[in-house]
Image (cartoon, rainbow, N blue to C red):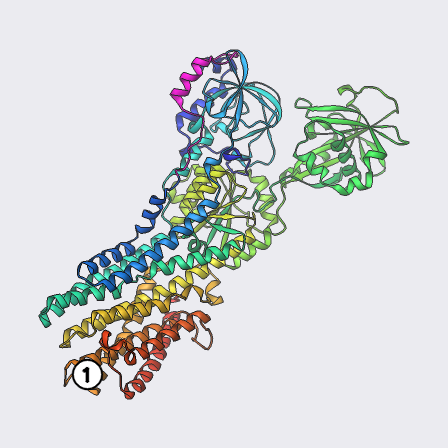
Amino acid sequence: MGLFSTVSGVIGRRAYVANLVATRASAALLQAARSEPQAVLQMHSSTMQGLSTAEAEERLEKYGPNQAVRERRLTWFDRLVSNVRNPLVILLLVLALISFITGDLKATAMMGVMVVLGVSLRYFQEARADAAAEELRAMVSTTATVIRDGQRQEIPLQDLVPGDVVLLAAGDMVPADVRVLSAKDLFVNQAALTGEALPVEKAAATEARELQNPLEAANLCFMGTNVEIGAATAVVLSTGSETVFGALAKSVVARQVVTSFDVGINKFTWLMISFMAVMVPAVFLINGLSKGNWLEAFLFALAVAVGLTPEMLPMIVTVNLSKGAISMSRKKVIVKRLNAIQNFGAMDVLCTDKTGTITLGRVVLERHIDIHGQESDQVLELAYLNSFYQTGLRNMMDVAILDHHEVRADLQPETAYRKVDEIPFDFVRRRMSVVVHEKGDGHLLICKGAVEELLSLCVAIQDGENLVPLDEQGRRDALALVEQLNREGFRVLALGLKRLPDEERLYSVKDECDLTLLGFLAFLDPPKDTAQQAIQELANLGVQVKILTGDNDVVTRKICRDVGLSVERILLGGEIEALSDEELAARVEEITVFAKLSPAHKERVIRALHAKGHVVGFLGDGINDAPALRTADVGISVNSAVDIAKESSDIILLETSLLVLRDGVMEGRRVFGNILKYIKMAASSNFGNMFSVVGASIFLPFLPMLPLQILTNNLLYDFSQTTIPTDDVDKEWLAKPRKWAIDEIRRFIVLIGPISSIFDYATYLIMLFVFGAWATPDLYHQQLFHTGWFVESLFTQTLIIHVIRTNKIPFVQSRASRPLILTSLAIVTVGALLPFSPLAGPLGFVPLPGLYWVLLAAMLLTYLVLTQFVKSWFVRRFAAD
């Protein structure tokens, strides 16, 4: 139902709405709570007869429509610009423009194709994902019942204004933040704001407590909550973005936080650009000064710039991420923002609410016990009759009792029992009774309700088959048992029984006396069967699960203990308020469970984890989770979440299960692993080429390779890398979170890159002195030199991916995917055949002698072995990935 979907949100009941609700707004709400109803009406220039139509129209003009803030949808142009605004894409476009101006149309076409492929793939994948996600504008048209001009009216929700008098009834959504003026048996479900599974009682009485958080006020109701039972008249205090609900929605439209993936890819991009900034001017000046042909030097330097640019990076990244998104969709995980996939894999802390993720998200009758705490079928059966025959609005605890369908089959209440009368529930007595006729056993008055109230009506207890008078010791024992259940997080109701003569009459509250206490009913939102398994599996993958909930610490402690989470120390929202950011950062790592949190508290916890170097995921489904979803490296929501939560998230789960997250984490690591393969290979190769080109430019009397040959080499080499997204990733690599480590990549580049330069220089020496290019630098020998280095460079760059792609021994302990092997073989074959093909002439190639191929084979073998040896040492020394 649009913004007003009922959700298992999480705000601590003591939580201050803090940074998300203005202090003045909180003060105004608290002032209304502490004021008499008539005084509140006067504050808003209203009466019990409501506003006049004219006054309402003026206020609507002043305060605006009663709508929460919405996130502006990206236009196609905005989305296109966001994808083009990438340093590598911009660099390629600049180089393509220069190539076009200088008449190098082949280079222009090649770079243009790379840009179009990378940008378009990313554009359409993200557009398709956003279209599939539910939009904030899909809010269903809703009305509110108000009194205007002294008459009851139905008006559109967005037309509500401060000072309006509204009427609330069971099933209604609260249309704004309101002060209750009068109420009858009013219970409101505040799950969207507090995370509490059970409704809370609201009344018109002036709040006498000194409160800091408006959410704790018993006479205030808030937009986004709904009425479970009862009816009320209330005056509107605030509407739209000025409500608690609306203030939280504002955080959704804030700028998306830069995530660890964005930071990492940008750092690598600028690292490569810095290499180019040094390399290209140096090559240009060296060749211009040494050879005197400045135009030729410029074209060569431009070709080197293209060769050094990892222009495939945007496409490799996008294809990897898109492939990962498709794979994850098959596992019921929808990716809205592609960059989130890598963050998923890098995540080492998952913060989540307990309701609906760790727990079922609904109340269950966990225990039905006698006065000694032993399971009792009699207690369950009589409680079932009580809930079965009541005609009032059934609450969640009645539903939980009636979920025991086996009792109905055994009892057969329709035939074995007959309803005689009912004493309805009210919030003064806090209990309800039904009277049933049991065949051959007279009438049974079965009373179910709050422990203290029902216990005060009891004169005896059922002890096995015996009735024992209820004395003070028995009363203390009963209360001690209930207290123990409460400490374990249970919500407890008492059950009493009174046997009456078989006579037809009307029953009343007066008959609820001289009861026999049978036992107790203990309710809980229990853990899912898969929760403990999922938490353990995530822990095995290096992902620590932390609980961030708005629920109280007693219930949270019980649930977390049941699923194996540490509850030795729980940090509460009030304690977080007293901590500085530095103090909080010092404590977040050692604490697993955080309770009674507000949205601001959750956001601070995530920022504190960021400060300690963690990549943080957050799983939430309520409007109140939006700030945390935005702040986390990867925001995760569920398909049943409110619209704003889904808008804020990067990942949407079709199932609310941590087991689904496990699959997403593995896919994220697999995707990142393949991206890193290209980065390490491209960066180390480019760094090695820098040394090779500079050295050749210094001592060679001619260009080491023609610009067209460099571009051809680059094109073929790029094609060989297009199948990297299909490659497998070693299981050992997937076993723990993987983050960007630019320093480690830099060390890898500096160590591995120069190895290729050694063999480039060996090729120079062979072509110059074995095949005579130095002694006779004529056109043929220049072409022979160009051809020899072209083939050696293409072979080494194409084959080295098989060494770099794994920490193991390539081809023996770890083998690449079939597509990657086939493209590698294809490019090597093309490179070997080019000097003998009809394209040799236009490209400036000549056939290579047989001895060259023998020497090349020896160099390749030596190169692969040496690189493997250095890589293995690097892995041991630096624990490289």
Q: Is residue 458 left or right of residue 719?
A: right
| Spot occupied by residue 338 in the image (x, y as percentages of width and height) | 42, 52
**Residue 195 image offset from top left, x and y in percent:** 55, 37
Mark 1 burial class by Cα count in 10 Å: few <14, some 14-19, many 20+: many
Left or right of 693 on screen, residue 612: right
Q: Which residues are magenta?
A: 45-72
The structure residue drawn at horizontal position 46% and vertical position 35%, both measured from the top left corner, is 137
Q: Is residue 220 above or below residue 636?
A: above
Quadrant for the C terminus in the image: bottom left
User: Eyeballing the image, is 9 above or below 684?
Assistant: above
Residue drawn 61% across the image and 26% down it: 170
Residue occupying image coordinates x 23% and y 56%: 94
Quadrant of residue 315 within the rendered picture: bottom left
Residue 872 visible in this rendered orientation of the protein: no
Amino acid type at circle 1 is Leu
In the image, 741 versus 68, the foreground residue is: 68
Answer above or below: position of 489 versus 688: above
Q: Which residue is mark 1?
A: 768
Q: Position of residue 332 (x, y in %)?
A: 54, 52
The N terminus appears in which quarter of the rendering?
top right
Magenta stretch, main secondary structure, is loop
Give SS at disc 1.
helix
781 magenta-colored? no
Q: Is residue 667 visible?
A: yes
Question: Which picture quadrant has residue 627?
Answer: top left
